[in-house]
Amino acid sequence: MKRLTTLLAAAAALTCLLAATALAGTTLTYANFPPAKTFPCIQMEHWKAEVEKRTGGELNIQTFPGGTLLGAKNMLRGVQTGQADIGCISLPYYPGVFPAMSVLNLPVAFTSTTVASLTMWDLFQKYQPAEFADVKVLTMFTSAPSNIMSKTPVKQLSDLSGLELRASGSILNILGALGAQGVGMPMSQTPEALQKGVVKGLVSSFDVLKDFNFAEICRYETITNLPVYPFAVIMNTARWDALPDAVKKTLDELGREQALWTGRYLDKHIDDSLAWSKEQYQVEVFTLTEAEHAEIKAKSSGLVDEWKAEAAKANLDAEAILSDMLALKAKYEADSGN
Ligand code: 3IO
């Protein structure tokens, strides 16, 4: 009898718990690889707040910054298999996996994160490339154009000779062509690599000077306007399919808005970060001559052909994707209000 009472009590408790869960709606996990104050996590928290507000609490998001649920390299697989419901990936960490959208990583001289992020979103909507077929894409955005942050001054291109710099994707090839020693690794491993001296600097956007405190160790910054890093926020397909239609609609409506919000946030934050670094650590900023920019361009041009060849192998219309990207870039550059 005592056993039966215990069993009934347990059953009642379970029923209450299930009812409470139903009332509170669905909770999805969202994994991210870099620390909480970096821009991929700032945009994650903004998205979470918008989603919870717009669905009236029907959908809740539990965020995991700093690789606490999935790291930079197992993010894609972790979302595909459902270890996390949602994850944020930097596409250059997956060479060969995203032949279409890696076009955003080419040296085409983006000057604004907002322009690059909206260009990426529109291009994805137009082509819906097969490389994302087994996940649901919630939003896309890019980092700001990449520059050199280093422990020793890079005042001119010849200072790059043999210099070990952390990067990912196409920037590694560009560094090689310029005589530097590109070292490929995710951003989340870079603090340790800089500390240990495995690398003497990195090539990324200036937000990281403040958000990772890289300004302390990398006192020299060189404006190079190298490619942006494209990102995607992806969701497990089965979890997406299980969402109510109204929730799906809300999330779909947020896709472009989130790309725009993130672009604007980062463009502004780049300026804040550089100003903070000058004040806090008196970092020096070097600019290159026009001839040096021309040299970078000339030595990077082969990358576009390499990308085209890779895209063609994946049965993509490379010429169309590239020209559409450049047209979108020009359109958004002309439209300052975006
Ligand atoms: C980046 C990645 C993680 C956190 C902050 C960041 N700012 C710019 C980037 C881009 C980058 O270097 C990368 O590896 O994705």
Image (spheres, rainbow, N blue to C red):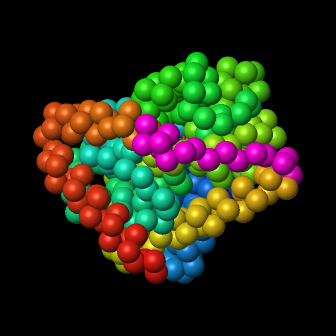
Q: Is residue 107 above or below residue 125?
A: above
Q: Is residue 281 magenta?
A: yes
Q: Residue at x 60, y 35 (%)?
A: 156
Locate residue 306: give its quadrant: top left
**Where residue 81 appears, x then y in whole percent?**
40, 40
Q: Residue at x 72, y 57 (%)?
A: 273
Locate residue 310: give its quadrant: top left
Q: Residue at x 56, y 32 (%)?
A: 157
Q: Is residue 335 above or below residue 33?
A: below
Foreground pick, 140 / 217? 217
Start and end of the magenta stretch? 280-295
How many labels sit on residues?
0
Direction from residue 198 to residue 335 in the image, left or right = left
Q: Residue at x 59, y 62 (%)?
A: 266
Locate residue 79: give its quadrant: top left
**Where residue 293 appears, x then y in whole percent?**
47, 44
Foreground pick, 150 / 130? 150
Q: Is residue 219 magenta?
A: no
For ligand 1, which image quadrant applies?
top right
Residue farthest to the right, as pictured: 280
Q: Is residue 130 above or below residue 251?
A: above
Direction from residue 277 to residue 293 in the image, left or right = left
Foreground pick, 181 / 100? 181
Residue 195 in sight from this viewpoint: yes
**Where residue 108 appears, x then y in whole percent?**
37, 50
Q: Is residue 189 above or below residue 36?
A: above
Direction from residue 93 to residue 206 in the image, left or right = right
